[in-house]
Amino acid sequence: MKIGIISGYSIANFVKDPEKIMVETTFGDISVEVSRMKNHDLFFINRHGEKSDVPPHKVNYLGNVQAFASSHVECILSIGTVGSMKKSIQPGDFVVPYDFIDFTKSRKLTFFDDKRVHVDMINPYCPSLRKSLIKNCKKVHGATFHDTGIYLTTEGPRLETASEISYFSKFADIVGMTGVPEVVLAREKSICYASLCVVCNMAAGLQNKLTAGEISKIYTKREPIISNIIQLTIDSIDEKRKCNCKNDLSKATL
């Protein structure tokens, strides 16, 4: 089975000796690391580019997802860093979101600019992949996780104001800058998609200040747990998933 992994950070000791390839897409060439894990072919993409220096509002979301689709990937496991808008969700915790709210402003959000395609977002994250992530979070010692959560995506690259967070927190639990349009584009390509979010800070108004170094520090500290969860999830993915992610796009087309 072909499985995609997308993250803004590398995952230390996740695989050995990956082969780096360039996948041509309509939206540019995408760097992909290809490796093998038991019976699965893994395709890793750093969403922020080969040098990990592309800001969130400039990420080549369409190119990344198209590269997975061109590689015949069936499932995408996304790893992202987020801020918490709820005191019950603390830095170092993990969240497996089940829904999202989009507050981005200027991103290209779809592969379909030339026809009327309206993909179903009732369950934007694959229920089967979410179930696998949740099951394996429970198995990993030291992983405090939340099996429900609403992810609110902001445009970036600036962080949010305290007033924005006060407003957003009425409707969502965590906030990040890369969740959308990635999840939507995966559905448009009929690829199962689920996200493991690493809480790296309390959002504005819930802590006094925030530095980029703090985000990286917490991610690095939790990296071994992330690797463990993702490896266990890859081992347990059901090839006969009971979900609607692969539904014929003709059903979404007018």
Image (spheres, rainbow, N blue to C red):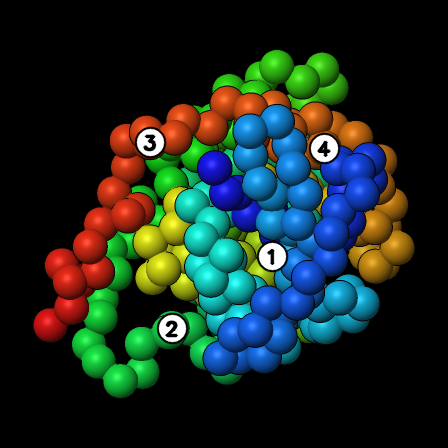
- Mark 4 is on which residue type? Ser
Q: Is mark 1 on a helix, strand or loop?
A: strand
Is mark 3 in CB contact (under 8 Å) with mark 1? no
Q: Earlier in the sequence, mark 3 or mark 2?
A: 2
Q: Which image quadrant is residue 212 in? A: bottom right
Task: Using the numbered discs, state the Cα–Cα distance from disc 3 to disc 2 in whole angstroms.
Answer: 25 Å
- Mark 2 is on which residue type? Thr
To which residue does mark 2 refer? 110
Number of marks: 4
x, y (%) of residue 243? Answer: 28, 37
Q: Earlier in the sequence, mark 1 or mark 4?
A: 1
**How packed is label 1: few (under 14 Cα within 10 Å), some, or many (20 or more)?**
many
- Mark 1 is on which residue type? Gly
To which residue does mark 1 refer? 176
Q: Which image quadrant is residue 39 in? A: top right
To which residue does mark 4 refer? 227
Is mark 3 in CB contact (under 8 Å) with mark 2? no
Viewer-side residue, 3 vs 78: 3
- Of discs 1 and 2, which sits in the foreground? 2
Task: Using the numbered discs, state the Cα–Cα distance from disc 3 to disc 1 in whole angstroms.
Answer: 28 Å
- Mark 3 is on which residue type? Arg
- Of discs 1 and 4, which sits in the foreground? 4
Q: Which image quadrant is residue 250 in? A: bottom left
To which residue does mark 3 refer? 241
Task: Using the numbered discs, state the Cα–Cα distance from disc 2 to disc 4 in whole angstroms.
Answer: 30 Å
